[in-house]
Image: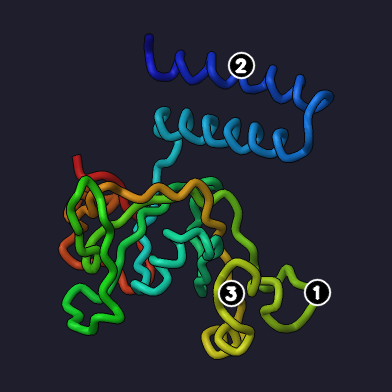
Amino acid sequence: MHTKSFFCILLKRMFVRILIFKRSSSSLHLKRHLSILIGVFYFIKIERNDYVNAVLLSLKPRFCNLIISGAKNIEIRKNRPTSELPFKVYVYCSERNTHNSHHILEVHSEGKIYRCNGKIIGEFICEEIISSNDSSTSNYSALEKGSCLSSQELSAYGRGKPLYGWQISFFHLYDRPQGPETLCTTEGKPFHRPPQSWCYARPNM
């Protein structure tokens, strides 16, 4: 069966289940089924190549580890892509040449240990972006929850200018970290040096 056809059928079945659970089960079951439904929808969009411009995002090892653990679900940046939401984000772990043991990030997979620094460790879907301008207050309090940053850290980073919280959803950790050369720019040029913050990217076919 064709991949798209399979997931379209799965999508219909999940919708029916949601209608049933809405009356007969708890809100927790409903939320789980809705989450699966949204995930299937995003998968179909990716398969249809609706994500014209994905993003390569550079993160310090500390924040990569927080995303892996699930503690961090918002990434703070000073700007945002113009891509239509939702869009795919590839996560690059920085500090490639660090010798500081506290800054080295490793993942255990298939009985092996892989160093993540200088590698793309996984990907997520950004389905919403929260702006500090949307807050009724003059500070960055709306962005604190989920970012794993204090109000002082946000203020020092933003310096009074707008900040954007990229929502992290459906994070997928790769079994084996990949080199940045597996991606390329929108012009088709392979990455030899990752961006300082973020840039548009796509798979290097």
Left or right of residue 78: residue 20: right
Per the image, label 1 sits on a secondary structure element best described as loop
Which label was assigned to residue 13? 2
Which label was assigned to residue 158? none
The structure residue drawn at horizontal position 26% and vertical position 55%, both measured from the top left corner, is: 108
The kind of residue on which mark 2 rests is Arg
Question: Circles 1 and 3: CB distance less than 8 Å?
Answer: no
The kind of residue on which mark 3 rests is Leu
Q: Viewer-proximal residue, 174 or 50?
A: 174
Quick one: label 2, few (<14), some, or many (20+) residues within 10 Å?
Answer: few
Image quadrant for the C terminus?
top left
Q: Viewer-proximal residue, 10 or 44?
A: 10
Answer yes or no: is residue 190 visible. Answer: no
Spatial CA span between label 1 and label 3: 14 Å
Left or right of residue 85: residue 21: right
Per the image, label 2 sits on a secondary structure element best described as helix
Spatial CA span between label 2 and label 1: 41 Å
Q: Nearer the viewer, mark 3 or mark 2?
A: 2
Residue, disc 1: 136
Residue, disc 3: 163
Q: Where is residue 129 in the image (x, y as percent from the top left)?
A: 60, 59
Q: Which of marks 2 and 1 is in front?
A: 2
Q: Viewer-proximal residue, 78 or 2?
A: 2
Q: Position of residue 56 (x, y in %)?
A: 34, 58
The kind of residue on which mark 1 rests is Ser
